[in-house]
Image (cartoon, grey):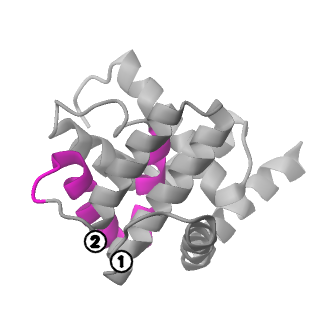
Amino acid sequence: MGQAVTVKENHIVASVLRKVVFLATGRMGLPVAQLKAIYDIYEHDITTVLDVRKEFPALTPLLTNSTVLGCLAFSRKVVPEASDKLMRALFSGKNLKAGMPAQALRMRLSTINKAEPPDDIKGQLITRATLDAVMATFDRRKVVSFDNSRTDAARTRLRAMSNQIISQIFTIIGAAESED
């Protein structure tokens, strides 16, 4: 990592990390030392997502917001192949057909953006759709639309698959809180 990192890149990394932390713990606003420890766990996944994003410079902000990137980094820890496959298809937009998770996610993100829901609702909708698209890619199933029950199940499955990592994160948080 000998390259200089810009302030904008640091901001993106911090935003993606906040989403990863929230997905793993359900918490926001952890102390810096805890965030650093969690970043160390997810550093490779966050860096990979951001590097792949850079391969496609013409991407719209819709496809590269921190919620989408954070979901991809979080899921990449446990289903790296599915996350990478979805990410590349989502970002490139090439050879997408109806029923493909990346195509369905692109359409869902566009619909969410056009509807202009409040930011907190928008984040939830984007999170659900992105995690469901990752799991659909993992399961090799087609997606035509997203519904809440399936998207909630996708998040639950990813969290279950991440249990060991999440336990490690809560150990870090618990140790830091006991020192206070």
- Horizontal relation, residue 19 to residue 58: left or right: right
114, 165: nearer the viewer? 114
Q: Which residue is drawn at 79% across and 56% down?
A: 175
Q: Characterize the magenta stretch by its predominant secondary structure.
A: helix
Residue 73 counted in the magenta span: yes
Q: Residue furthest top?
A: 7
Q: Is residue 34 above or below residue 8?
A: below
Identity, as a three-letter code, of the amino acid under mark 1: Phe
Identify the secondary structure beneath mark 2: helix
Q: Label 2: which residue? A: 81
Q: Which residue is drawn at 62% across and 64% down?
A: 148
Q: Quadrant location of the N terminus?
A: top left
Q: Quadrant location of the C terminus?
A: top right
Q: Label 1: which residue? A: 138
Using the rendered view, name the quadrant where residue 29 is placed: top right
Q: Which residue is drawn at 34% across and 80% down?
A: 141
Q: Nearer the viewer, mark 2 or mark 1?
A: 1
Residue 88 in percent (x, y) is at 21, 55
The reply to whether residue 69 is in sight is no
Residue 75 in percent (x, y) is at 45, 63
Residue 135 in percent (x, y) is at 43, 73
Q: Earlier in the sequence, mark 2 or mark 1?
A: 2
Q: In this view, does 140 lie above or below 81?
A: below
Identity, as a three-letter code, of the amino acid under mark 2: Glu
- Horizontal relation, residue 46 to residue 166: left or right: left
User: What's drawn in magenta, residue-wise?
Assistant: 66-95
